[in-house]
């Protein structure tokens, strides 16, 4: 009997070990080679859909179009100026498209039947990335794995970490590490759009970011590293001008949690700021928390994650015209954004659901995330309170930065269904605002230190 019990215990341990290893397993070379055949180099389906409304991926837009100027960041010149609206989705006909709409889009159509619509254009798979990113993604497919708890990543570097994902957490990390340059320098505006359509500035910031995950030097096997460093200084409005924030995230937030510091101009002190994470308000308005930054960032440990599936969904795509020619006063409307300036396209999106774990605290009880298969960008999210009620949603506007090349998903359009206003975040229109994404430039490491905050605070 004792021998039988020992055998059963050994079998159970073996099964658990197999289950854990399978959850984080690398893929075989045969599977990885699909990235050169039926899958794109970062894992999307190359083929179009059956009815032709989604075309095949043929490389996207890998080089800048003629006449592009880059004096202060890349121009978001419209790559498809001759495209016409195929049809519009509104309150009257939304029923026939319901399965291809996010909950946020449905809410807007129902809430504003007389003023909101979705103009649908031909789907253009414009996404492209540098060849070295593609090469690294292939190596990651062969070598990268999740940590045992799935809350961190190992041996991934310089490209999509999991181009052929095995679980929901891997999709989330693909989104966090979606390619947008080794470094970024931006000056952007965020506004609250009031019930009457007027704008209230909530932040005017200069952000400097390094993405060490994409740096040439690869960490040693099994070693964790920084994936994102961000320094931000508030230039306005006056009540927050001079305040600064520093955030550093790692590839394993459980072993190396978010490190954050803040400088408050009124106090002239640099302090560690462990509260700049999870569901603490992020300060720009009442519509977001710290892990809403860049649509989602930070640790995954407060939620259980699962893949709902991949679906064809309408999403703002190739929306270059917003930043290129649209002043924020023209883009903002009472209750919602101006539908004249948003191009919607049908794309295949991975849908991931996060449910708050028992015993954990967060303002969101459930979150539904939509990831674009061609870029791994988190392009839309629907968020629910702890009673299960639909509460907040954000829509990102995808456009191709030709000079990187890579895809960006700004501005972010955030709504709270209980409030009469909405938020327009990361808007780059105008001479003083810009976004520069650098393919290989690395910003000085000392920018991302508490000493730099002190130095800047003494100016």
Image (cartoon, rainbow, N blue to C red):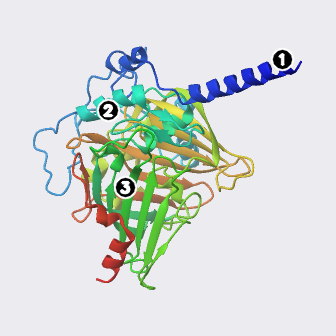
Q: Tell me what residue is drawn at x 63 percent, y 58 percent.
A: 418
Q: Is residue 227 left or right of residue 63?
A: right
Tell me where residue 405 appears, x and y as whole percent: 24, 40
Task: Return the disc, 1 or 2, that comes first in the chain's sequence.
Answer: 1
Residue 67 found in image quarter? top left
Q: Which of 128 and 13 lies nearest the eye of the viewer?
A: 13
Quarter of the picture containing the N terminus is top right
| Secondary structure category for the residue under label 1 | helix
Q: CA distance from mark 1 to mark 2?
A: 48 Å
The residue pinned by badge 3 equals 331
Q: Is residue 45 left or right of residue 4?
A: left
Q: Tell me what residue is drawn at x 35 percent, y 31 percent.
A: 137
Tell me where residue 448 appears, x and y as whole percent: 35, 64
Residue 54 found in image quarter? top left
The residue pinned by badge 1 equals 4
Q: Tell me what residue is drawn at x 50 percent, y 40 percent.
A: 172
Is 369 located above or below residue 230 in the figure?
above
Q: CA distance from mark 3 to mark 1?
A: 71 Å
Look at discs 2 and 3 and give the one toward the viewer.
2
Residues packed near mark 1 inside 10 Å, few (<14), some (14 to 19) or many (20 plus)? few
Residue 351 found in image quarter? top right
Look at discs 1 and 2 and give the one toward the viewer.
1
Q: CA distance from mark 2 to mark 3?
A: 38 Å
Quarter of the picture containing the C terminus is bottom left
The answer to whether residue 47 is seen in the rendering is: no
The residue pinned by badge 2 equals 136
Q: Which of 85 and 277 lies nearest the eye of the viewer?
A: 277
Tell me where residue 439 appears, x and y as whole percent: 23, 45
Is 309 located above or below residue 277 in the figure?
above
Task: Return the disc, 3 or 1, that comes first in the chain's sequence.
Answer: 1
């Amino acid at each position: 009997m004792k021998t039988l019990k020992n055998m059963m215990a050994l079998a159970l341990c073996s099964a658990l070990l197999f289950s854990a290893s399978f959850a984080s397993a690398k893929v075989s070379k045969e599977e990885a080679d699909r990235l050169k055949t039926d899958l794109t180099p970062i894992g999307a389906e190359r083929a179009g859909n059956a009815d032709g409304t989604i075309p095949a991926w043929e490389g996207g837009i890998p080089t800048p179009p003629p006449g592009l100027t880059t004096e202060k960041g890349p121009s978001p010149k419209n790559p498809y100026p001759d495209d016409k609206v195929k049809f519009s989705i509104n309150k009257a006909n939304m029923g026939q498209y319901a399965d291809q709409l996010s909950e946020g889009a449905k809410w807007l159509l129902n809430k504003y039947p007389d003023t909101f619509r979705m103009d649908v254009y031909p789907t253009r798979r414009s996404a492209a990335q540098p060849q070295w990113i593609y090469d690294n993604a292939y190596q990651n497919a062969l070598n990268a794995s999740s940590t045992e708890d799935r809350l961190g990543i190992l041996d991934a570097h310089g490209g999509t970490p999991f181009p052929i994902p095995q679980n929901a957490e891997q999709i989330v990390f693909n989104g966090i590490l979606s390619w947008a340059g080794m470094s970024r320098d931006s000056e952007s505006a965020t506004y609250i759009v009031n019930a009457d359509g007027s704008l209230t500035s909530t932040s005017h910031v200069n952000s400097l970011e390094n993405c060490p995950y994409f740096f040439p030097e690869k960490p040693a096997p099994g070693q964790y590293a920084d994936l994102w460093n961000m320094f931000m200084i508030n230039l306005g409005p006056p009540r927050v001008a001079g305040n600064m924030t520093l955030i550093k995230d790692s590839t394993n937030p459980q072993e190396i949690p978010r490190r954050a510091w803040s400088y408050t101009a009124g106090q002239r002190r640099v302090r560690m700021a462990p509260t700049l994470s999870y569901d603490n308000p992020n300060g720009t308005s009442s519509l977001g928390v710290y892990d809403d930054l860049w649509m989602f960032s930070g640790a995954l440990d407060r939620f259980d994650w699962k893949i709902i599936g991949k679906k064809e969904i309408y999403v703002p795509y190739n929306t270059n015209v917003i930043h290129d020619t649209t002043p924020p006063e023209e883009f903002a409307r009472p209750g919602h954004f101006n539908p004249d300036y948003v191009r919607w396209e049908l794309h295949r999106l991975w849908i991931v659901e996060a449910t708050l774990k028992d015993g954990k605290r967060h303002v969101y009880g459930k979150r539904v995330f939509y990831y674009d298969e061609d870029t791994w960008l988190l392009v839309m999210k629907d968020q629910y309170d702890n009673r299960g009620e639909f509460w907040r949603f954000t829509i990102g506007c995808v456009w191709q930065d030709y000079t990187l090349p890579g895809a960006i998903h700004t501005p972010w359009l955030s709504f709270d269904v209980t409030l009469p206003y909405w938020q327009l975040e990361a808007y780059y229109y105008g001479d003083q605002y810009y976004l520069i994404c650098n393919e290989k430039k690395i910003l000085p490491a000392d920018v991302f230190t508490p000493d730099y905050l002190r130095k800047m605070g003494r100016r």
